[in-house]
Image (cartoon, rainbow, N blue to C red):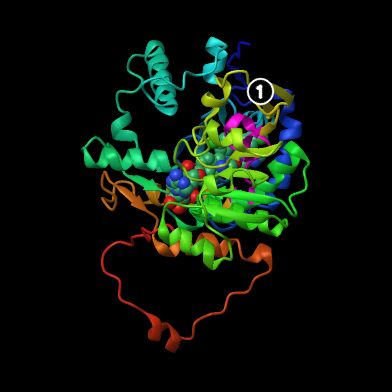
Amino acid sequence: MALTVSKTPTGSEYKVKDISQAVFGRLEIELAEVEMPGLMSCRTEFGPSQPFKGARITGSLHMTVQTAVLIETLTTLGAEVRWCSCNIFSTQDHAAAAIARDSAGVKAEEEYEKSGKLPDVNGNENEEYRTVLRIIKDGLLVDPTRYRRIKERLVGVSEETTTGVKRLYQMQANGSLLFPAINVNDSVTKKKFDNLYGCRHSLPDGLKRATDVIIAGKIAVVCGYGDVGKGCAAALKRAGARVIVTEIDPICALQALMDGTPVLTLEDVVSEADIFLTTTGNKSIIMVHHMKQMKNNAIVCNIGHFDNEIDMHGLETYPGVKRITVKPQTDRWVFPETNNGIIVLAEGRLINLGCATGHPSFVMSCSFTNQVFAQLELWKERGTGKYEKKVYVLPKHLDEKVAALHLGKLGAKLTKLTPAQAAYISVPVEGPYKPPQYRY
Ligand code: NAI
Ligand code: XFA
């Protein structure tokens, strides 16, 4: 399906699947706003002074309802915004339509539109990088002078993802970073929400939508007890499951035990458990020889690394194995020797994306409020020399402010330190704030 560039009556360009979905998009955006108090407080606090006046902000991030609330926070603060969906699967067409109609230029589904094919994930470069290169190349064809001064004009970048942040630190190390960058991923209020609370919310949702099995009473194995594993184990326990953890790190293993959860190996429990979940960020965790030993209709799913924790290749190529698709994202795989089947969710990819709707608005509000603070800081300090061509994290007081802006909505009241208490616990800090490096 070809998408054409269109214009709103006010001249804003857009390229979205179906502009008529803007009405539905707007209604969901309005629901999300109430659940995104951090972003809405930014509008109240900074809107009147228009701090982004003159700033042109462009983003490449999943074009969802929650991202729409971020975009409209930036425009409320005075920015001119253009947005490009970063992933063909993650675009919510109604959100894209509402933003295109009301707030910012939007490009969605770039790759798919051109070739009709999914991007080649095995290409040499990663997907975001190739998307950016392609946009630059297309732009140069239209106007060869188009990007000549981008290096001088670019004020800075804020980055959301672990992978993106890693790449920025590599660029800093090899001298190829051309602009200041703020690492939003390592704000406490981003990471804990993304990894711990977000997954704690959406794992049971995905399991229930996909299978409808009762979780109570089941034996669930959670591979990995980092932030994601801790959140998922907690959710499964609250739903009444008996949880067992596998770990390679003695500290995380001990934490599981202190939380009352046995730590064993997959081999120990593979033929006993009902639900298997990978959260390790590592690869090759549940292999086909494990799956073969599982009980009939054991559920196998992943919420950790995008696609390589479960040995789907081994399963697909197992001699005589039969795949029965119950519905999209729910497959029963039957082994010929035993005639036992296992139920694999989301084809081994992220269960909370494939079988649920990802993070809820409140979780995204914590990430995105960090994004707004990062952009405000970069724009305010442009040309002052405060930020060099390096990667920074937000100062602790801003991380705390993100949290503070989410307290009111939940009816919390914070106790204030007395001056004497403040002096008693104050520790002089030298140099820039460094977030804790440990991950427990
Ligand atoms: P983490 O590093 O805190 O935890 C991973 C844990 O797995 C560690 O404790 C590690 O010791 C353990 N581990 C590694 N190899 C193992 C093995 N072979 N067997 C058993 N345990 C093993 O990382 P975190 O924050 O929990 O994230 C994990 C993954 O989840 C990452 O790939 C991350 O990108 C992804 N993630 C997914 C989300 C989602 O919505 N689906 C949200 C946030 C993160
Ligand atoms: C899709 C997001 C990715 C959607 C969009 C539509 C639907 C569900 C793909 C995404 C991320 Cl990779 O959004 C989700 Cl129907 N998100 C973030 C998100 N999750 N991430 C769960 O929801 C966090 C994460 C992940 C997956 C961290 C590390 C590794 C993988 C963007 C977003 N989500 C809110 C969607 N609500 C409808 O805006």
Q: Residue furthest front?
A: 337
Q: Quadrant of residue 330?
A: top right
Which residue does the numbered mark 1 point to in the structure image? 336
Query: Residue 325, percent across and down?
Result: 72, 23
Residue 408's place in the image compared with 294, above or below, is below
Residue 415's place in the image compared with 339, above or below, is below
Segment tinted magenta in the rendering: 344-364
The residue positioned 34% from the left and 38% from the top of the image is 167
Q: Amino acid at mark 1?
A: Pro
Judge: label 1 CB < 8 Å from ligand 1: no
Q: Residue furthest left?
A: 175
Query: Residue 135, percent across and down?
Result: 43, 20
Query: Residue 424, percent across and down?
Result: 39, 86
Q: Nearer the viewer, residue 375 or 212?
A: 212
Residue 98 shown left or right of residue 197 in the figure: right
In the rendered image, residue 29 lying in the magenta stretch gets the answer no
